Image (cartoon, rainbow, N blue to C red):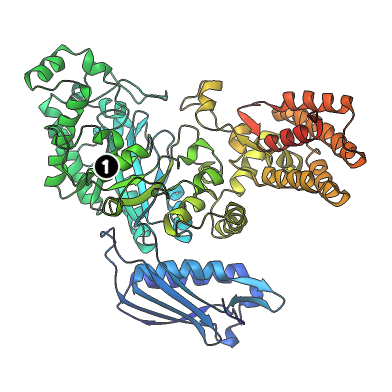
Amino acid sequence: MHSGRIAFAAPLRPVVDGPSSARVESAVARWSARLADQAGPEATAESRGGTPLKIQFSAVGNLQDPAVDGSYTLRIDRSGIAVQAPTDIGVLHAMATLYQCLRRDEAGWGFPALHITDAPRFTWRGLLIDPCRHYMPRHVILRQLDGMELVKMNVLHLHLTEDQGFRIESKLLPELHEKGSNGQYLSQEDIRAIIREADLRGIRVVPEFDLPGHATSWFASHPELASAPGPYQPDDRYGVLDAVFDPTNEATYTLLDRFLGEMAALFPDPYMHIGGDENNGKQWDANPAIQAFMKQHNLPDNHALQAYFNQRLYAILKKHGKRMMGWDEIGDVPAGSAHALPQDVTIQSWRGKEGLVGAARAGRDAILSNGWYIDLCQSAEFHYLNDPLPPDSPLNAEERKHVLGGEATMWAELVDARNMDTRIWPRNAVVAERLWSPAHVRDVPDMYRRMDAVSKQLDAIGLRHKSAQLELLRLLAGSDDVAGLKGLVDVMAPVQGYKRHQLAAHSTHTPLTGLADAAVPDPAGARRSTALIDAFLAKRDAASAAALRSVLEAGTNTLALPCCRAAADARNHLVKAALVIIDELLKGPAPDAGACKAFQVALDRAQGPVQEAEFADLPAFQRLFTAACTPKK
């Protein structure tokens, strides 16, 4: 940072020194419009000539090279804004940073004087989107690209086939999407549009076709390729289902060769993901012909049989110029075994970091997703402190080179096109930072401060994590007046992990319009009340009590709506009991026993979960109870 600032006057006036680049042209136009939108009419002053922007870069980056240079420098001083980068990919990152630098002070809208030198820590910074469990139309996916660009993510992973749906058009084998999608699929033109817009934002698109399990939708049109008789149709259940390809049937490989060849021509990325996860092997165990094949080919177990299948897939992908990638199960066969896959297969580690460590030690590239399953509604802090290469990583310097980065995964069992943004953003920004910034940047309170700022920026450029929640609240309330309901939802979060599946039976037909769907993971309101409770416990003075009381009382104005009366009643009892304890602590060291008993009852009532959601700040209330009502030794 330097002293001083420059005023912002729309539009940006670029002078570009570099080869012709559609990426740079579109980025300048896109960010110039967004800066103007943010600053409003007062910053649009044509008579001032706009804001000068000098851009210098040497080459158009090859996006299909995962190691393409994305570094840049950004300098802002009285003469204007200057961007320098080896490639146009770096220019894109600089423009995203420039947007984040815009601020308003007493002099109006402008940029602080500064000099930034920046480069990513990892080359693979991805987001997986699952349009299979719930269909995600083209416009929903395109919108996520804008968010990814802002936070400098560079890989969009599309999970395109699953038990619940075959979500991509095949012109060679149209029966696949016609019978396997219930009419909901991405056309090849949709895919081309997504790839085109992703490229303009410096984002690669990696397709996944999950094989040999998670394959029910394939068999709606080709039951003869399954390991057990049909008929089949896209399943509406979730979990690990039995349907699996027959790896002993040569027709399986004939069809996959045709289909994957078609997809290889459609997707330019060098990687193709073949899934490979969660095959329970039940159909293989029950099929006498498959068992005889295993015995004949010295395949001792289902791991070896799946390795045989993967080896056949590897040859098909190699033939079509693609590099194989899969979930960590495909690496379960030890390197050096007759059934092991070649070294150039990339592993995506989801069950734990052991898959990543094992792959790197075996000389294979790997990325991490374990710890970044953002559909599980865990806190931003949990995701932020997760790291592919933590300080205690057992990998040596050479092995660490095989760790390419990681991906957040947005699985869609309990997410649809309406609320997907609320599950991805803003927490995905902290995954993006972990994959971009140095490992030592781990200040959690400052992360939350910056995440809230980025959340506003994401909202400003069109992401719907804020507006979609209000839409769901209006549905819940049956009214446009959702202020009271918003106060309740702001301190509630969906239960974490896979607990919602334990609390109720969910299928593809379950409406995602309940309290847990409107609530967001790690809500800001709960973080605010938690901070104020902890501040009061530290100070125990009138000022901290007043600040806490103001926030807690504001949240008790929830209307007694039928949709969430139980949650509202539990919250009101909790807050009222806590306020009594706060007043008691201001009077003396030990609250009245009756007040403590009432607080304990309110805490028990608030434990939940309520409608598959829970009070995210409940641990802070429990700390208040412990501090106030636990007998001193």
Q: Which one is in front, 584 or 194?
A: 584
The quarter of the image holding the C terminus is top right
Quarter occupied by residue 84: bottom left
- Give residue 298's position: percent from left, percent from top: 9, 22
- Give residue 485's position: percent from left, percent from top: 73, 38
User: Which amino acid type is shown beneath numbered disc 1?
Assistant: Ala
Numbered label tally? 1
Q: Is residue 603 left or right of residue 196?
A: right
Outermost right residue: 587
* Residue 228 in sight here: no
Q: Is residue 527 above or below residue 297?
A: below
Q: Is residue 619 above or below residue 93?
A: above
Q: Is residue 422 left or right of residue 358?
A: right
- Give residue 147's position: percent from left, percent from top: 48, 56
Q: What element carries label 1?
A: helix
Q: Which one is in front, 126 or 222?
A: 126
Q: In this view, does 219 lie to the left or right of 105?
A: left
Q: Residues within 10 Å of mark 1 (few under 14, many from 20)?
A: many
Q: In this view, does 458 lie above or below 308?
A: below
Q: Which one is in front, 533 or 203?
A: 533
Outermost left residue: 296
Residue placed under numbered mark 1 in the picture: 359
Residue drawn at (31%, 42%), measured in percent from left and top?
357
The quarter of the image holding the N terminus is bottom right
- Give residue 131's position: percent from left, percent from top: 40, 39
